[in-house]
Image (cartoon, grey):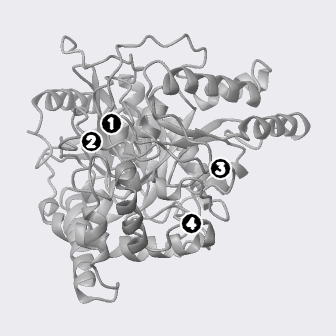
Amino acid sequence: MAAALPVGAPAAQAAPPEPPPSATPPTFDLEEATIDALQEKMASGAETARSLAEKYLARIEALDRKGPALRSVLEVNPDALAIAESLDAERREKGPRGPLHGVPILVKDNVGTADRMSTAAGSLALAGVAPREDSSVVRRLRAAGAVILGKTNLSEWANFRSTHSSSGWSGRGGQCRNPYALDRNPSGSSSGSGAATAANLAAAAVGTETDGSIVSPSTSCGIVGVKPTLGLVSRAGIVPIAHSQDTAGPMARTVRDAAILLAAMAGADPADPGTRTAPFRAEALGALDPSAIRGARLGVVRKSIFGNNPATDRVAESALSALADLGAVLVDPADIETAGDLGRTELDVLLYEFKADLNAYLASLGPASPVRTLAELIAWNERHRAREMPYFGQEIFERAEAKGPLTEQAYRDALAADLANARTKGIDAALAEHRLDALVCPTGGPAWMTDLVDGDGNGWGSSTVPAVAGYPHVTVPMGFVFGLPVGLSFFAGAWSEPRLLSYAYAFEQATCHRRPPRYLATADLAAS
């Protein structure tokens, strides 16, 4: 089994994932516990921050290291229990800081932590390397009283290394598994955050998204995911792909938990010039109003989304009926006509920005890092091919390295085309034409079979247009296909998070589709 590596330790070549038989997990008294419930337990004295951390660490040992061997957590924080104890002492002396005080949270391995854990984006090249300071997201979470429990596995380099990658695989952690069916993929690149949250290995987790990397693993792992408006959450200290689309966001089992986590993460940051003050206070993210859906005009995006998987379509039609029953006004269809125009230009933008942004990030690590540029990283991977590239290569890295600076006209033209097709001609146009409050559609299909030979399958979903636009996107469980979860997406214009979260909350509370995984060896084809 590919366990978490001690900081600085070398890794053996990851063994191919051989799905174990279905595993019955041990009884866990915190299963499906919400952040509010954990606070109630600590307030009553039934639990402490330390006891919660101990229980979740034991859960990681039972399910991630043993049992179904999810491989969703790369390493646990060696200081977690000490941090929890200090927060318990503070609670006794001063009371809690807020809803996250003492709550165990996992963060993706590309989110910087200046502690005894690595920040490696899953790569062996950066194993043992820690940044000089916390990312802004982690700094805000620590200030809110969260216990950073550990680092989650991911699609290495946020799934921007190879065109034949398997989502959820990294050199540090091997192949992450989907807890609903162990031979299925958790999707990427925030695969470990999705699988760990679904399996109750922490109260919630932080993921990152450039295009689909929060919402796709969230739908595949049956949880809530929020990709915020670009600029709501600081990117400082996060291993980048592209500054025009990158953002961190919460992944949780309930909408309220996601809103609580997002409120703690959000805010302007001088270290990230792309952040700016949102037209609402962060506290507004937690003010969920299920009545907001009554009379809300929701446009149904069908083009390129429906028709890919008949079973998912049936679940989606049921979800649309539920929205209508809640009082939403469905405008059907309300398609985004420019969605198909984004493929080539989006990739060009990401390639240009990846080279520039990653070079800047690697340079910031100083002498602690064995690689200082993308070119050096490519060479490092070639020297360590047996361990770092046993299943797929680094074609995307090589294409990015061949790009010129961000001053090139080709980059500027591609970025301008992206923003026009995703924003003004895309989401903005659809909202205006139909007088909509939001757009709604399936997030994607059920999880595909993990395949280290040919790489990922199931290449459709709703993430690209809001990702390229930099607009918010919320996914919430909407049902199951053969026992595999699928999600419902809500997205709209910039800064619409409070509205979208309220719509998702109303749907969640009315339908209650979330249910814990069973860690089956394969999908239950007898399930409806």
Give the amino acid at mark 4: Ser
Label 3 residue SS: helix
Give the amino acid at mark 2: Thr
Which quadrant of the figure has residue 148? top right
**Labelled disc at residue 369:** 4
Name the foreground residue: 271 vs 428: 271
- Is there CB contact under 8 Å for labels 2 and 1? yes
Q: Residues within 10 Å of mark 1 (few under 14, many from 20)?
A: many
- Spatial separation of the CA atoms under disc 2 and disc 4: 37 Å
Label 4 residue SS: loop
Q: Is residue 510 left or right of 65 when viewed as pictured? A: left
Q: Residues within 10 Å of mark 4 (few under 14, many from 20)?
A: some
Name the foreground residue: 202 vs 267: 202
> Which mark is first along the chain, 4 or 3?
3
Q: Is residue 95 above or below residue 267?
A: above
Q: Is residue 336 left or right of 520 when viewed as pictured? A: left
User: Viewer-nearest of labels 1 and 4?
Assistant: 4
Q: Identify residue for label 1.
A: 219
> Which mark is first along the chain, 4 or 2?
4
Label 1 residue SS: helix
Q: Identify residue for label 3.
A: 141
